[in-house]
Amino acid sequence: MSPLAERYRAIGSALPQGVELLAVSKGRPAAMVRELYGLGQRRFGESRLQEAVAKQQELADLPGIEWHFIGRLQANKVRPVLQAFPIIQAVDSLALAQRISRIAAELNLCPQLYLQLKLRPDANKGGFERAELEQHWEVLQALPSLQWHGVMLIPPLALSGEPLQQLFAEVVELADQLQLPGRSMGMSGDWPLAAAHGSTMVRVGGALFGRD
Ligand SMILES: *Cc1c(COP(=O)(O)O)cnc(C)c1O
């Protein structure tokens, strides 16, 4: 078995039932995506448009592959991202959601979306704070041509252990309040903790593909 296949099997056997794996393939060659597809993996996450589109073209022969855009989405990239990705995970502002809605309607698409949360101060990241989300939720829900599927979290780098667990619990509570089924949280460093504390989808890059 290749090292990639070994890591894939190890993660798969440690993931609790009901928690999906998003293989974060940004910066990785199409051949590795193809190998994982051959082992049964279908969901892949990318954060750079050009790189992703090139990979998608190379892998166009793989039916049922599911591409998630997980990067920060700039306003001028909304149209091409919608054309390439049925699922967008990092919707981090009302203005972005409104723009996605307008362009999705024009393109006759209905993307699946995740709201990026920022429940702790974090200068490096976008996302909705709780009060802001509660304030805008009605407007967000009413935007046409969108399917709100869940929330997504990128925790502050410094957080671990009990405080991180507490943050995961708050994400679960907020998702329940909004009646959103998806909770995308957990990355290479914290996916076991996230999976044990309410994640429905862990997004794993380095721990799956290897660190280079
Ligand atoms: C890169 C990335 C990941 C994966 O990170 P690893 O630490 O390599 O597992 C997960 N989520 C987002 C939003 C990312 O940009």
Image: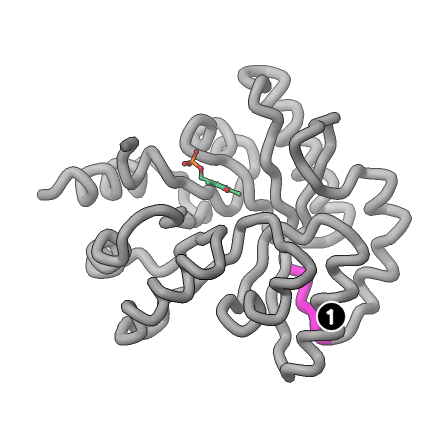
Please tell me in which quadrant of the rendered image residue 123 appears.
top right
Image position of 67 with respect to 167: above or below: below
At x 70%, y 46%, the residue is 175
Image position of 172 with respect to 114: above or below: above
Count of numbered labels shown in the rendering = 1
At x 63%, y 60%, the residue is 113
The spot of residue 137 in percent (x, y) is 83, 54
Dominant SS in magenta: strand
Which segment is the magenta one?
A: 145-149
Which residue matches tag 1?
Answer: 101
Q: Does residue 102 appear to the left or right of 168 in the view shown? A: right
Q: Does residue 158 appear to the left or right of 202 in the view shown? A: right
* Kind of residue sitting beneath label 1: Ser
The spot of residue 131 in percent (x, y) is 87, 39
The residue at the far left in this view is 1
Judging depth in this view, the residue of 141 and 67 nearest the camera is 67
Image position of 9 with respect to 141: above or below: above
Image quadrant occupied by the C terminus: top left
At x 64%, y 84%, the residue is 108
Tell whether circle 1 marks a residue whose Cβ is less than 8 angstroms from ligand 1.
Answer: no
Q: Residues within 10 Å of mark 1 (few under 14, many from 20)?
A: many
Image quadrant occupied by the N terminus: top left
